[in-house]
């Protein structure tokens, strides 16, 4: 959704932009091209391999960008407050991550059960699968994967690992497939379990909460934030963030009691509250974009 992101962020010459998920640098290259000749971009990614790939891709724009390996949760510390006209967060995993068997994100290919976006981190998916209790695994598969057979899978994992610890993606995907045969279904039965493990390994939801708050802080008034989500857990958080910050009042505690509301100036307004989704042409070229949802906000 490159064209939609450029339009949503109103990318223009001399603008300063931040891309918190630089990946292979596709969106960043388009933002630098659209802000020629003097626009500037700060980019980061947790994945060092992605940062190097982006550095190569962005070489034609030398002198107009700075890249760092880092979590967008630390955007404020990395990029400093208030100087940006637009921020992009394009969440989730990239195609190079999914396609590299050795990164362990994919149940389609055999590789180590890893799933770390930042390979400097200790915790891997194998650690969770081999160490969490049945209750903890059940909760994880249920809450982060919406997996209806969470407890059954967790019990089977616990039995299996007594015999042999889990080391590879094929071991785990194979076990789930034996428990829940495909019977012609399009989606692999391990999809939800792999999603849940990936979100947990990379602590994706709290990174997102911190990243959204940081993105708002590094924007100038009138600056725009574009967020592309790939599943409902992320999307719900983005909507809740936008809703809370667009309110013209606050309330104490968790419950909004009208009598206790305190007026305040909203921190942002929605530019695009209803999600923009990929068109038919994009789906044809990139079927993985089918669950992408783009939302846009503007700092007040
Ligand atoms: C969908 S890809 C981004 C693709 C990119 N927009 C492009 O045009 O090539 C998502 C990227 O976000 C990175 N990522 C996910 N969560 C992150 C976080 N909390 N901080 C920094 N990078 C993150 C992943 O490592 C991955 O490279």
Image (cartoon, grey):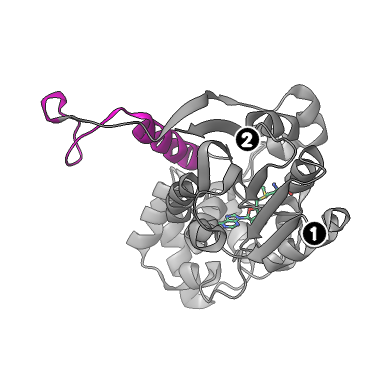
Region rendered in magenta? 232-260
Check disc 2: other Cα within 10 Å, few if <14, some if 14-19, many if 20+: many
- Residue 214, placed above or below residue 252: below
Residue positioned most to the right = 60
Whether residue 189 is visible here, answered yes or no, is no
Element type at marker 2? loop
Classified by dominant secondary structure, the portion drawn in magenta counts as: helix
State which quarter of the image contains the C terminus.
Answer: top left
Q: In this orientation, which residue lies closer to the viewer: 82 or 126?
A: 82
Place of residue 269 in the rendered image (x, y in percent of width and height, measured from the top left): 45, 28
The residue beneath circle 2 is 292
Per the image, the residue denoted by label 1 is 63
- Marked residue nearer the N-terminal end (2 or 1): 1
Residue 87 on image: x %, y %: 59, 44
User: Which residue appears at 74% of the width and 30% of the height?
Assistant: 3
Q: Quadrant of residue 248?
A: top left
Q: In the displayed structure, would residue 150 be above or below residue 111?
A: above
Q: Residues within 10 Å of mark 1 (few under 14, many from 20)?
A: few
Q: Nearer the viewer, mark 2 or mark 1?
A: 1
In the depicted structure, whether residue 125 falls above or below residue 73:
below
């Amino acid at each position: 959704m490159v064209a939609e992101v450029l339009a949503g962020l109103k990318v223009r010459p001399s603008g300063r932009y931040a891309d918190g998920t630089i990946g292979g640098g596709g969106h960043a290259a388009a933002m630098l091209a659209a802000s020629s000749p003097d626009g500037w971009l700060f980019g980061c990614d947790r994945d060092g391999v992605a940062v190097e790939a982006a550095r190569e891709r962005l070489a034609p724009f030398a002198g107009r960008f700075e890249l760092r390996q880092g979590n967008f949760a630390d955007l404020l510390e990395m990029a400093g407050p208030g100087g940006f006209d637009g921020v992009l967060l394009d969440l989730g995993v990239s195609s190079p991550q999914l396609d590299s068997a050795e990164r362990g994100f994919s149940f389609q290919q055999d590789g180590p059960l890893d799933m770390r976006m930042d390979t400097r981190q200790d915790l891997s998916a194998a650690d969770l699968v081999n160490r969490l209790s049945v209750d903890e695994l059940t909760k994880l598969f249920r809450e982060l994967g919406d997996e209806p057979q969470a407890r059954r899978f967790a019990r089977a994992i616990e039995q299996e690992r007594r015999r042999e610890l889990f080391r590879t993606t094929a071991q785990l995907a194979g076990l789930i497939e034996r428990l829940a045969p495909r019977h012609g279904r399009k989606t692999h039965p391990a999809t939800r379990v792999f999603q849940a493990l990936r979100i947990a390994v990379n602590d994706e939801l709290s990174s997102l909460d911190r990243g959204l708050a940081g993105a708002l802080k590094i924007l100038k008034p009138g600056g725009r934030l574009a967020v592309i989500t790939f599943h409902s857990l992320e999307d719900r958080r983005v909507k809740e963030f936008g809703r809370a910050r667009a309110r013209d009042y606050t309330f104490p505690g968790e419950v909004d009691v009208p009598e206790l509301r305190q007026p305040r100036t909203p921190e942002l307004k929605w530019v695009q509250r209803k999600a923009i989704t990929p068109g038919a042409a994009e789906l044809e070229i990139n079927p993985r974009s089918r669950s992408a949802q783009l939302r846009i906000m503007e700092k007040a």
